Image (tube, helix red, strand yellow):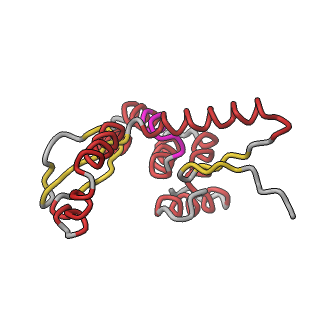
């Protein structure tokens, strides 16, 4: 009988714990958790009714704490009401601050404010590292401003996402650039 694989699952994160290198494994888990917390701190919840926000966006942690507290206090009654469809009147949407920064960067780029657009894209990448749309937009900006090697690096990051439309555009652009084409 083989030993079970020493993995701890947390959402989409998987951690390999090596009993031989426990200190290193624990540090790795701590670093990954810190990175996850850092990227989700910009996540917020938007409550809306018929497409109109009911209030300002709520930080994700505060929303989850409120949900846990209300479940504890209201208990089974709340679960019954939600199952009957009463909770479906209010839309709950997860939003990320990086999306707004990306949109601002796109607007600035279209207005010709290239330096400010680049700053916005880089800020969005700090908020959500590796975001496909942001990598693609930054790569386009870098390519247009003549910084081909850095542009290729960001196109490659965006192209690594097979499910995102910007990932496909990045792959096509890389193919053209590798063939010596001048178009984006």
Residue 111 point in image, percent of width and height: 29, 41
Picture quadrant of residue 41 = top left
Overall secondary structure of the magenta stretch?
A: helix
Q: Is residue 86 above or below residue 112?
A: below
The residue lying at 24 percent from left, 48 percent from top is 46
User: Who's the residue at 58% across and 61% down the image?
Assistant: 171
Quadrant assignment for the N terminus: bottom right
Q: Nearer the viewer, residue 157 or 97?
A: 97
In this view, the residue in front, 74 or 60, is: 74
Whether 145 is among the magenta residues is no
Image location of residue 43, percent across then percent down: 37, 42
Residue 88 in view of the camera: yes
Q: Is residue 120 left or right of residue 39?
A: left
Assess whether residue 127 is covered by the magenta stretch. yes
Residue displayed at 20% across by 70% down:
84
Q: Residue at x 21, y 58 (%)?
A: 77
Q: Position of residue 28 (x, y in %)?
A: 69, 35
2 or 176, which is in the foreground?
2
The one nearer the camera, 147 or 87, is 87
State whether residue 105 appears in this view.
no
Q: Is residue 146 left or right of residue 84?
A: right
Q: Read off the magenta span.
A: 123-130
**Figure label count:** 0
Residue 79 placement (x, y as % from top left): 26, 60
């Amino acid at each position: 009988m083989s030993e079970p694989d020493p993995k701890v699952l947390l959402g989409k994160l998987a951690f390999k714990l090596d009993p031989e290198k426990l200190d290193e494994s624990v540090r790795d888990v701590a670093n990954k958790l810190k990175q996850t917390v850092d990227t989700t701190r910009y996540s917020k919840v938007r409550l809306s009714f018929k497409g109109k926000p009911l209030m300002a966006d709520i930080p994700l942690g505060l929303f989850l704490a409120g949900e846990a507290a209300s479940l504890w206090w209201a208990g089974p009654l709340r679960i019954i009401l939600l199952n009957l469809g009463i909770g479906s009147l209010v839309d709950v949407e997860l939003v990320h601050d990086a999306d707004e920064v990306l949109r601002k960067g796109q607007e600035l780029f279209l207005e010709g404010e290239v330096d400010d657009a680049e700053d916005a894209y880089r800020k969005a990448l700090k908020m959500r590292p590796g975001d496909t749309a942001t990598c693609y937009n930054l790569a386009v900006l870098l390519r247009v401003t003549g910084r081909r090697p850095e542009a290729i690096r960001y196109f490659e990051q965006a192209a690594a996402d097979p499910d995102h439309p910007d990932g496909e555009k990045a792959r096509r652009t890389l193919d053209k650039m590798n063939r010596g084409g001048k178009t984006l």
